[in-house]
Image (cartoon, helix red, strand yellow):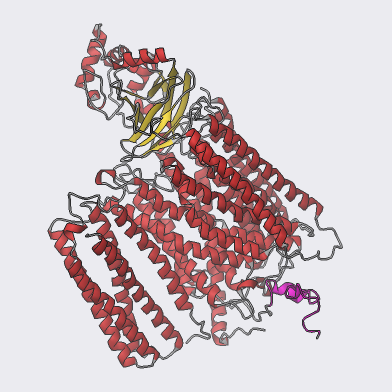
Amino acid sequence: MPAEFIHHKNRVLILAFIFSESIFFAFLITAFVLYHGRSPNGPNAHNTLDPLKTGMYSIILWASSLTMWLSEKSMMNFRMDRCKRWLEATMILGGIFLIGQGFEYHGMFAKGISIGTDLFATTFFSTTGFHGLHVFIGLIVLLIMRGLTSAGFGQEEYQREGFIAASYYWHFVDAIWVAVFFILYVWGTR
Amino acid sequence: MHASSVLQAHSRLDQPIVHLTIVVTAIMFAILVLVFFLVVYASLRYRRRPGMAEPYQNFGNKKLEITWTVLPFLLLVSIFVLTVITMGDSDPPPTTANGADPSPDLVIIGHQFWWEVRYPKAGFTTANEIHLPAGQRLLTRLEAADVIHDFWVPELGRKMDMIPGTPNELWLLADHPGTFLGTCAEFCGNEHAWMRIRVISQTPQDFADWEQQQAQSPSLPNNPAAERGEQLFRSMSCANCHTIRGVSSADVGPDLTHLASRETLAAGRLENNPVNLEAWLHDPNNFKPQSYMPNANLKPDDLSAMVAYLETLR
Amino acid sequence: MSEVPVALPVLRKLERFEKEAGMLSWLASVDHKQIGILYLITALIFFIAGGVEALLMRTQLMFPENRFLLPDAYNQIFTMHGTTMIFLVVVPGLLGLMVYLVPLMIGARDMAFPRLNALAYWLYVIGGCLLYFSFFAHDAPAAGWFAYTPLSEKPYSNLQGMDYWALSLLVIGVGTVATGLNVIATVATMRVKGMSLRHLPLFTWMSLINSFLIVAAMPALNAALVMLLIDRQLHGNFFKPAAGGTPIYWQHVFWNFGHPEVYIMVLPAFGIISEVIPVFSRKVIYGYAVVAGSTVAIALLSFGVWAHHMFAVGMGHFLDMIFAASSMLIAVPTGIKIFNWIATMWGGAIRFTTSMWFAVAFLIMFTIGGLSGVMFAVVPIDWQLTDTYFVVAHMHYVLFGGTAFAVFAGIYYWFPKFTGRMLSETLGKWHFWLTFIGLNLTFMVQHNLGILGMPRRVFTYPNIHSWNVLNFISTMGAYVLGISVIVFLWNVIRSRRHGALAGPDPWDAWTLEWATSSPPPVHNFNYVPPVRSARPLWDLKHPENPDWQRGRRTPHHAR
């Protein structure tokens, strides 16, 4: 138990971190936009991506933000049982999203499209790949949170601040996907 | 060899840059002198003397702050205006008078570590040495075959990057006949230091003569040593990298068709004469270590034959 | 009065651990003071490495057509020199000062996240070792510290050097961002009561703004590095013209990092100068709000100037002009600080300690570097002088004459706080003059070399008389600098044992770090004085004329 607790330092840290990571994604997305249309003959967004299918998985991911929010709200109301359930729901939804991405990648690999194939492939795999990595890391963080809640975590304010920071991260991951989905799958495939 | 100074303009395209450089340097120097004086004066005048009380705590003065913000700002605005004007004067757009997009008179392609020089309208390619008609500007396209290089002849004007996949264009102009030295100005690998540029500006008549000579294919060698040299050139790996018109075609290394007419060897590394040519062929790595020219390990007889042959390529 | 609510048993345990564990306590430490010193010592070691690299380069360049170093050795050395100095010396050294001083200056017990602080330091060490391991792998990176593509791609850099470079910078970068985040969280949430943002010491202000720069700029580097690694290792196409990519995108992404990076390297220096000059002039900083506010302006503007590194690329006059304008604009908030510092000295009672010598010299040296920088904003001048020794001169005046001088000023100022002992003023004067002479001898002539047409990054040069003379002089200057570093090292080593005892406040200074012992106890403060202005100790020592009464005609309490 810490001797003194500094309010909101977790939130400040994670918000500054989110700001930083967003800029990282901005450069990857910019590469996609810059290089859009420069692979007319090979695989490109239009002939390779499926916005409808990916859109479904996207909705699942964005729904996980809702469940994350519900989990956080439950914790703030000291309803730890509900907090755990919503947290599990978040992880399942996030996991389904990753599986969906896995299917998408698998389909492309089967067609012989990998990151080196052409400019579209390079920018596509790098952007969605790093996003997927951030989702995966988020799932690990949520798993840790879920494990901690089993051990009675959530009573102290500093613990709740930590949980809030983790939930901010999860929302960030979903927000990045808004940009990635609309630029790569909607704008990119028209 | 003389240094090519940024402050020496031999082109009316470079003259405005020299003027601007002098003006801006003078202004910067004046500011430096002012700061220097203020710092030294304050250091001496306001040294602590024994028994001094704590001085008056001056927190600042808004008016003064505004003054010494606005004045530099206005100064920079003036410099900006001069900048824009000079940009237009020194780097005119690569179009003709009525705005059309002309094809280039000169194409220079940067390679590791030599310059491919093409005169598309005259219809020939050479290497490493660039000739210009004095007083007449040539629209020059700059490209790169491998990594980024940069074309820079200080006495003629601005430098411009040569970027693979993205051609750049600038006007090359020398006001009067002369030789102007430059260098590759973007780090391009091991022999970046020896990727030097030689621009020879000639009277229009001399330039026309030179173009005509360069456009010709070399005549057959007329002595046994040179003949043998030509055979060696074909049979050994030389022909795989170097073009000699009528003999071989490759662009890994510089075009050698008129090698003997040039003033230097290996992009400015050595003065071009038979002694140096032999030394170069004997051991290129000695002069331009870690460039891409391999050592052919020629036996002395073969070496002399090769030199004899190359010397016929005027 | 602010009590420091630390449980006494915890405190006792920590103190005992640090005393008894000795060296081990340093390795396992999460104490910001120990981590700060670790940063400084490690940065010093890498400074020697980078300095040796510089001496090797200057030795090769002493004579024309010299054969001391083969080209690929020279190219690896100049790449490692730049990469070392920037990523392994200047930035970590400044981070070390930041993590040591910021908690003390705001009256806090430690950083917001002490373990993250330690992690960041060790990532720096690991990343640095990874970079230097490339020498053992017979291929250090050799494409320059900004690694332009396609030269940094395969097949032009075919061995592992560039991969070591990219991976080590990614590792170090994580640590740097972590510290930036940590400083932001610390300053945002752990200031002692009474320390509003208006009362922050300027070094803390600069550290805070710098941390925003770090977290906003490093991701650009990370993006560039992963793109390069994808191209190199996974056959990606980001920078390959044959596939439709462009090498210019590397430059845009890199310089989006690279330009803010140079401000990252100079803002803490501005902070140090803003602490040192007032104390040794015995006057409050002139225009506190302007110094702080202009730095915010610099931070914002620094993201709008990056393409001034690309004026020779051929982006077109319109873009060139925009970046020329923004680059000239950023000179204003940078330059007016010099006036504020001079005005602080004006009317003061200046004490020329070694620290002050370095600070005053900084004013002139940084002005030289800054003015040559403004020259580069003038596009046609850049068209002639970019990629020449004029740039090398510019960067070393701002980074050595600027940042390094400020860091030396800071070391002479804060060494007593870190160790409890004073550095020798005699050795300090020797150090100062050798450094000052060495710096100017080495780099002033490089302005001339650039004007005389000598490009940068060349392992040798042709036999041109003026170049021969100037290069020789420059090399002599470099050797003088080498000697100056030895003098400095000797001063540090000797003073640790034999320096005069410092006491808590040897300089009669005004910020909170001087309100505790030297070195501070593990929990920093037994008692934090009340904070009602930016100079709490001045207020304490001058109850008749405290800062917070400035502008009031009658004392606050006399009603």
B313 drawn magenta: no
C541 drawn magenta: yes
> Dividing the image into 4 quarters, which one contains the C terminus of chain A?
bottom left
Q: Main secondary structure of the magenta part?
A: loop
Residue C220 in which image quadrant: bottom left
**Location of residue C252 with respect to A97 vertically, above or below:** above
Q: Residue furthest right?
A: B51
Q: List x then y, in percent, for residue B150.
A: 41, 36
Residue C125 appears in the picture as rendered: no
Left or right: residue A72 versus residue C22 is left
Left or right: residue B175 versus residue C351 is left
The magenta region covers C532-558
Which one is nearer the viewer's eye here, C332 or B34?
C332
Q: Residue furthest front?
A: B98
Q: List x then y, in percent, for residue B240.
A: 22, 27
**Location of residue B70 with respect to A168 vertically, above or below:** above
Residue B187 in which image quadrant: top left
Q: List x then y, in percent, for residue C322.
A: 48, 49
* Residue at (76, 52) in percent of width and height: B43
Left or right: residue B293 versus residue C281 is left
* Residue at (40, 70) in percent of width and height: A18
* Residue at (16, 60) in percent of width and height: A108
* Residue at (21, 75) in percent of width and height: A96
